[in-house]
Amino acid sequence: WISKSFPIAFGFFFLLAFQTAAQQKSAKGNPNIVLIYLDDLGYGDVSAYQAGTLQTPKMDVLANGGMRFTNGYASSATCTPSRYALLTGTYPWRNQNAKILPGTAPLIIDTAQMTLPKMLKNQGYETAVIGKWHLGLGTGIVDWNREISPNPNHVGFDHSHILAATQDRVPTVYIENGRVVNLDPNDPIQVDYDNNFEGEPTGLENPELLTMKWHHGHNNSIVNGIPRIGFMKGGKSALWSDVDMADHFLEKGKAYIEEKSKSGKPFFLFFPMQQPHVPRTPHPRFEGKSGMGPRGDALLEADWVIGELYNTLEKEGLLENTLIVLSSDNGPVLNDGYYDDAVEKLGNHTPAGPLRGGKYSLFEAGTKVPFVTYWKGKIQPGVSDALVTQMDLLNSLAALVGSSETGPDSENLLDTFLGKSQKGRESFILEATSRTALRSGDWAMIPPYNGPAVQNQVNIELGNSSDYQLYNLKDDPGQKNNLAQSNPEKLKEMKKKYQEIRGD
Ligand code: NG6
Ligand code: CA
């Protein structure tokens, strides 16, 4: 009896022990976490920040009902490096590959690296990313017609439904758990960032086929009348519809929340949205609604989507048990490569608020973005001036869920994110197109860099200067008075700190 039944009995015992452990985990009552991450949303684009004229009532519900950070930073002034830092708790300038990636780039997160979703998964969370990825896929040479691996599911997400890079880059298809959605095997997809496929029209050669005109870059393959970055052929049945993209991701996000709500396990939903990045293609029902052209309309659409997600959480009875974080990957830009009236129809709106620069810039507007934490009944509404960065979410959320898994440059600022403390981090090195600068206390220091002071095509001041720049942000949030000459003591101190952190 013993020899025959022992393995069964042992197996049964093992199963019991395992179940108890799993039950204990969910019994801890950790909250769901929904991280809403916009693309190129500026400090002045959320009306609760009172720094622009566009109205975003749904984002304001979160910003006015939670903690609104006025010194909340993305880690970089462009997308890929910010996302890298957000998910790994690592400075993007430590990884040479963390720069704006083409759609064919390999995954830049090492599958052995600790990530935010991995840490949460190890605490019993179900995890998903629904939206823009832009962290690379595969190992270098990707066959888009097979399973693409590694993909988000190899760095901590149980489920992924993504666009590979950006809305303006090929491939213009959705990818679910490593597979292109709706792909017809008889019409395979090919993607190339160097050479066009013979006979395929391009934005450069076929302006007559365009419904949106390119201003700079963006003149390769044409999809839905919009010229993109990169060349692509085939995959007709899988191509996304640009004007339906917001509805598409919202539907996936809602379905995920509803499904997880039933399972009773805590979930982490990373919801990186494509708005207001180019090409700005709001659904026709939002057209003309902002009076600011497609950029403003896309923001109203994004605001509506956020409201719908909020309503879904409310309907499922999850609001009191869900921490919502709202932020943006980098600061704003108006003309980012298409003629879309963003400049012409802006009116009095100020996407960067009082800040200098914008996307791509070492000045404040590049990385200081809307940053909100909301948790009904748990976070008291308030405003915080503490210095916090997206990189700090990993260690802070680890503290929240009782994990000791951390990222190398992340700081545990949980109490600050929950509004129980006003203390932020002391210093932080921000990045913008492979250059770096120091934020510390009330101060910003930008080392000298070669290169143009202004990127003319996008009309943004990049922060380049042959001299050191030093600003006191408390007195001078718009960085107008360079104090490097008049305050050599502070400059010395800032240089030292900068070198200590950079380690070079
Ligand atoms: C730039 C693109 C810009 C945008 C950006 C990435 C050109 C001329 N400009 O290279 O339109 O796609 O990359 O934006 O191609 S981000 O928000 O994903 O970093
Ligand atoms: Ca971006």
Image: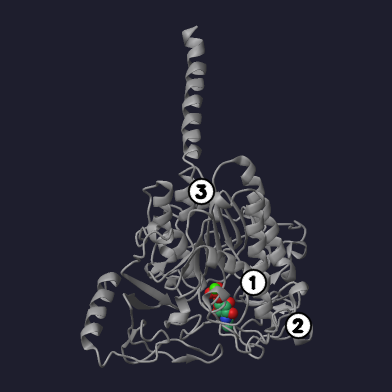
Please state which amino acid type lies under the numbered disc 3: Pro
Q: Quadrant of residue 410?
A: bottom left
Please state which amino acid type lies under the numbered disc 1: Gln
Determine whether 180 is above or below 403 in the image. Answer: below
Label 1: few (<14), some or many (≥20) within 10 Å?
many
Q: Earlier in the sequence, mark 3 or mark 1?
A: 3
Label 2 near ligand 1 (CB < 8 Å): no
Q: Quadrant of the C terminus?
A: bottom left
Determine whether 39 is above or below 338 in the image. Answer: above
Which label lies toward us, 2 or 1?
A: 1
Q: CA distance from mark 2 to mark 3?
A: 47 Å
Q: Judge by depth and name the residue closer to the eye, 203 or 352.
A: 352
Label 3: few (<14), some or many (≥20) within 10 Å?
many
Reading the image, the residue beneath label 1 is: 167
List x then y, in percent, for residue 255. Answer: 68, 51
Q: Earlier in the sequence, mark 2 or mark 3?
A: 3
Please state which amino acid type lies under the numbered disc 2: Leu
Which label lies toward us, 2 or 3?
A: 3
Determine whether 14 is above or below 316 in the image. Answer: above
Q: Is residue 8 left or right of residue 239?
A: left
At a point 67% along the width and 87% down the height, the residue shown is: 341
Q: Which element type, helix, strand or loop, lies under badge 3?
A: loop
Reading the image, the residue beneath label 3 is: 31
Q: Judge by depth and name the residue closer to the eye, 248 or 42.
A: 42
Which label lies toward us, 3 or 1?
A: 3
